[in-house]
Amino acid sequence: MTTHLALLRGINVSGHSMIKMEALKTTLEAIGFQNVQTYIQSGNVFVDTEEENPAAVGFKIKQEIFKAFGHEVPVVVICSADLEACFKNNPFLKEKDIDTKKLYVAFISTTLQSTSMNDLKISQFKPDEASIDGNRIFIKYAVGVGKTRFDQKYIEKKLNVIATIRNWNTVTQLLKMYEER
């Protein structure tokens, strides 16, 4: 059995694509996923399955959400190593007196190239900062996520990927939940 963490993008935000987590849990169990566990209403769901390929798991979840709820929901599937890398590789954690409330991680559907940072043109969003690490973009927002144009839609458009962003508190909780499974 492999445990995967599916990060659903854009559900239960501002009244769009509403899906109750209990209904999602029941739906995913009905198609064979085991030990389904959700965290908060924004679409974080752990599943156990014999399928090892994260992309295949994401595709199956995406299909089932569309069938059951009628929503086209992008899904990025990660493993515990992805979350562990967030703590090991986040350059902003090394800063003295860092305010973790300003830290976010964009999880990307594919591994990014080293040239992707140039494609993002992050300098036009100063004082916001970002750093690419594989299939993650570490972000430090100067003012806040609600007051920037450097968001998931911008990242997706510039890099032609699926992205979903989680705040640092959520990343911390998800890793803790992975370790407890």
Image (spheres, rainbow, N blue to C red):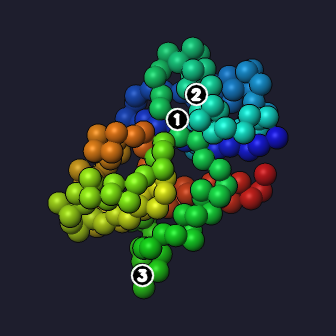
| Furthest-right residue in this view | 1
User: Closer to the N terminus: mark 1 or mark 3?
Assistant: 1
Residues 2 and 18: in front is 2
Q: Residues within 10 Å of mark 3 (few under 14, many from 20)?
A: few
Q: Amino acid at mark 1?
A: Val
Query: As rendered, which of 180 and 110 lies closer to the eye?
Result: 110
State the SS at label 2: helix
Query: Which residue position holds label 1?
Result: 75
Residue 59 circle label: 2
Mark yes or no: residue 39 visible.
Answer: no
User: How far is the residue under mark 2 from the one under mark 3?
Assistant: 38 Å
For label 2, the crowd category at 10 Å Cα-Cα, with few meaning under 14, some 14 to 19 and many 20 or more, is: some
Judging by the rendered image, the residue that carries numbered circle 3 is: 95
Residue placed most toward the observer, 173 or 122: 122
Callout 1 touching callout 2 (CB < 8 Å): yes
Against 144, residue 33 (above or below) is above
Judged by depth in the image, the label closer to the viewer, 1 or 2, is 2
Q: Which circle's residue, 2 or 3, is located before the other in the chain?
A: 2
Residue at image location 57% in from the left, 14% down from the top: 67
Image position, residue 152 (x, y; %): 35, 45
Q: Secondary structure at mark 3?
A: loop
